[in-house]
Amino acid sequence: MPTKSKFHPERGLLFKVVYKDKEFKEKMAKALIKNRVEPYPDELFTSWLARNATINYLQTPTFVNCYFPEYKNGLLSRDADVYVDEEIAANFAKRMLLKTEDIFKTSLRGYAGYLGETISSNNRNSLISPVKIRGRYPRLKGLRYCPECLREKEYFRKQWRLSFYAVCPEHGGFLVDSCPECGEPVFLTKRKLDTESFNCWNCGFVYKEAESEKLHEDSEGANHLAKSVEILRNGYFTFGGTWYYSVFYFWILKHIARIIYLLGYRNWDILEKEAELHGIELKRPNEVKGKMIEEILTLKEAFAVFTASISILRFPESLKRFIESNDISYPVLKRDLSYIPFWYENIIWKYRKQPRYVTIEEIENACSWMNKNGIEPSYSSLSRLLGIVLERRKRPELIKLFGK
């Protein structure tokens, strides 16, 4: 257990007396914050905010309430990592003598145009794990981390909030999504112990002291994850030798994950291999409650499902093999997609079953046979005989035939 330090002077009587002074509070709300740290290039907003509160010997909510009272009871009562926009970033940057673009990059909204066309300020964003803040505490295990990364440099990375980012490619271990001591979700804007290290808000466990489960040496998960991270970083991907916008890659990546997890099309070698190597048992489709996979997938389920999905989208041939080995119909392949990217449609249209067209001569012969056998020809009786659906509005030439 780390040694306690004077990390929370606001607990003392002097701070409480001074903080109640109206004039002092107004000065703090206008003052430039010179005692500050710059964000790392891939740092998460709440991580950067908590580190600044720490060097000013304040809890994060107190830091916000003192220096940014315009966000009091608002910024930290929601998912701040998706709530911070360019206007909020500019305000923090101005008061802390930093660049607006550096602050905005810490927000998950910086993924707009790469991960999705837009990133909303609410908890429902595609491929971003939600945390669901209630009463300033998390209700879901949406924030994850790699203990070894924290031990090397103690800050939380943005990519740890991605729902497909379940392992650390650098250290080859599963991320940690809850306190190893008490099981509560990881959270950054509240802490228990008087220490500069990030620690559990409930029991005080220091996050970087956790141990992560290592991937099996035969696992392919880290390699596939690294490829998707590269696509996100570049903003484009190649499929069949052609370059495409990364947004549509992640759009279909989630769609394939839904087909696997929610609809049960799971005949795929890499999925079976990773599940066996790491003892992962996916829930059956009828056991899954909810449709938002970002919220319902466990950490290990996400690892298996997204490893498989990423491998499926590597080449046109692998996507075709997945469709054919699972005998997936065209309606399933496009279900719930408001827009179908060309590169994806170019593959799946071949699995569309075209209705058989029956010629007028075939229908006349069928009517002749029915009359000989005492069956009155009609749209319904012909449909049953021919094994197709005949519709008046689509076959107006049949009106004269039945008129005879």
Image (tube, grey):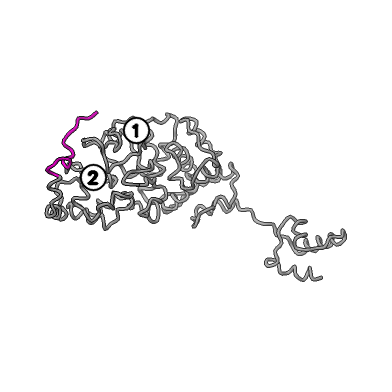
Q: Is residue 383 magenta?
A: no
Q: Quadrant of residue 296?
A: top left
Above or below residue 75? Residue 321 is: above
Q: Is residue 14 left or right of residue 205?
A: left
Quadrant housing the N terminus: top left
Residue type, numbered disc 1: Cys
Residue 223 visible within the image: yes
- Return the disc, 2 or 1, that comes first in the chain's sequence: 2
The percent coordinates of residue 328 (x first, y second) are: 59, 46
**Rendered residue at 38%/48% (across/down):** 232
Between residue 176 and residue 78, name the one nearer to us.
78
Q: Main secondary structure of the magenta part?
A: loop
Residue 168 visible within the image: no
Q: Is residue 8 magenta?
A: yes
Q: Which mark is residue 263?
A: none
Residue of label 2? 60
Q: Is residue 101 left or right of residue 226?
A: left
Q: Quadrant of residue 120?
A: bottom left
Above or below residue 294? Residue 365 is: below
Q: Which mark is residue 182?
A: 1
- The span picked out in magenta is 1-15
